Image (cartoon, rainbow, N blue to C red):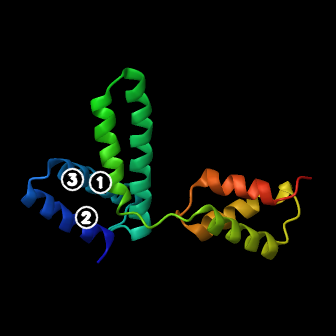
Amino acid sequence: MSIIQTLQHDQLRARKEKNQVMLGTIQMLLSQIKNEEINLMKRDGLTDEEVFSVMRRFIKQQKDAIIDFEKAGRTDLIEAAETEITFVTQYLPRMMDESEVEQIVKQIIEQTQATSQKDFGRVMGLVVKQVAGRADGTLIQSIVKKLLPSA
């Protein structure tokens, strides 16, 4: 079952259970997924990875909104955004931990024979491609900086 099918199934379940938070969040996600399909001109629908990318973008938007809500003192909106983040996160694949990312970075440094910070961009590109959204970019960046010798 694709992630879109899972979301549609859960949308029906939320409707039956009258779970308005779950229903609203899924409808918002499905809307953003549809918009992405239109933007990318994909008639066959998005791949699961593209859907995960939309979900990650949604989570980032909610986190940014939380910062604004905190400045405005809107605790009610903060709780709603945190609930949505928690809900959407359950659909995403498990994120890699620091040791897993470090192991991949070491392998790529060895494969590319990177010797200094001058190779940073090349190593970053390959690591990001290999982890395919299963690790945070800032975590990857810090590990690459730590493992590449400075010039």
Residue at 44 percent of width and 59 percent of height: 53
Q: Are marks 2 and 1 in contact (CB under 8 Å)?
A: yes
Judging by the rendered image, the residue that carries numbered circle 1 is 29
Return the residue nearer the eye: 142 or 117: 142
Mark 2, Cα crowd under 10 Å, few <14 / some 14-19 / many 20+, is some
Return the residue nearer the eye: 99 or 25: 99
Residue at 43 percent of width and 50 percent of height: 57
Spatial CA distance of label 1 from label 3 is: 11 Å
SS type, badge 2: helix
Q: Amino acid at mark 3?
A: Met
Is 75 placed left or right of 13 in the picture?
right
Q: Is residue 44 visible?
A: no
- Where, by quadrant of the figure, is residue 121 drawn? bottom right
Judging by the rendered image, the residue that carries numbered circle 2 is 7
Is 53 placed left or right of 84 in the picture?
right
Spatial CA distance of label 3 from label 2 is: 10 Å
SS type, badge 3: helix
Q: Earlier in the sequence, mark 3 or mark 2?
A: 2
